[in-house]
Image: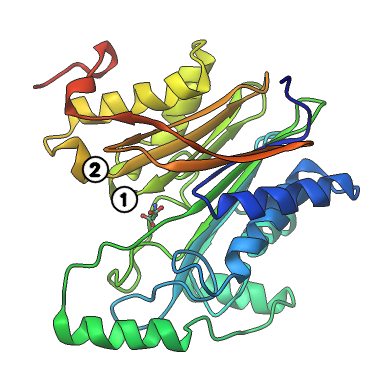
Amino acid sequence: MSIDYPLFVSTWTFGKPANEQSLKVFQGGGSILDAVEQGIHVAEADASNPSVGLGGIPNAEGVVQLDACIMDGEGQRAGSVAAIEGILHPISVARRVMDNTKHVMLAGDGARQFALAQGFASVELLTEERRTEWEQWRVQNHPPDNHDTIALLGLDSTGRLAGGCSTSGWGYKLPGRVGDSPIIGSGLYVDGEIGAAGATGLGENVMRYCASFLVVEYMRQGLHPEEACSATIRRVIAADPRPAEELALNFVALDKQGRYGAAGTGRGFEYAVTYPGYSQVLQSAALSDTDVGPEGGNRR
Ligand code: ASP
């Protein structure tokens, strides 16, 4: 079946309803950037999703702090917010940073004050369910290991690319911790001439390698998006002393030709692909310690 446009690729099963909303927005006359932004709203507003927006897992002090960024392949524009509190749609605040300021990134209370000045409402993002879990966590103090991100990439029939990502980050993180998701080139990268890539997993292991930028650079060298994701992971596996399973690295990628793919450590992960007449959750390629390739300067 040949691909039709617009095409949306995103992380996890919760990416599918987000992609479908993106398609609706585009078909309703929105740009590919509008479509990406408003698709991400679906995950941000879903209180049952513990990884993004409303109902996200709080930090160690019980406060939900959100990270998000957006990129427009046209003009290489970007906007980002980090550790923002009490705003339902951080992806839209990131877009306002991109559209309405001279800056790329706002953090913490400055990001929140900017959002309020732009007319965003102040909301309580911590749900009762997450508060109860957090109270139990404080007593038991078991290691926090819950996290996910929506990274959503879009391409229209004119070749315009856009991407965004949004997350509540690593559950019970230290207050003020910022992950990979709002860092341009780490959690997300869009190059309007080449393609787009986004990440989910342990942000600390993405940021140290500027990994979404690296995925796009591999696509620039001619690799298929899935192979570009795999090559990036192999490079990190080769460079990092820890076992691949512990790294928890997962990438989605989409190139300007409409090819897409994904790869993750361990068993890999699920990602969603949507275009007119098609919307599916697919399984990514899976990489382990034995998959170290020539890219990495293998230290093992
Ligand atoms: N990358 C996100 C972070 O570290 C979490 C995730 O996607 O699993 O904040």
Ligand 1 falls in quadrant: bottom left
220 in relation to 192, above or below = above
Along the horizontal axis of the image, is 199 left or right of 59? right
> What's the residue at 38%, 36% (across, down)?
210
Q: Quadrant of the N terminus?
A: top right
Kindly give the residue lying farthest to the left in the view shown: 300
- For disc 2, the marked residue is 247
Q: Which quadrant of the structure image shows residue 169?
A: bottom left
Ligand 1 near label 1 (Cβ, under 8 Å)?
Answer: yes
Image x and y of residue 87, in percent: 59, 76
Colour convention of the picture: rainbow
> What's the residue at 45%, 66% (across, down)?
168
Image x and y of residue 206, in percent: 34, 42
> What's the residue at 15%, 82% (across, down)?
140
Q: Is residue 99 visible?
A: yes
Q: Quadrant of the C terminus?
A: top left
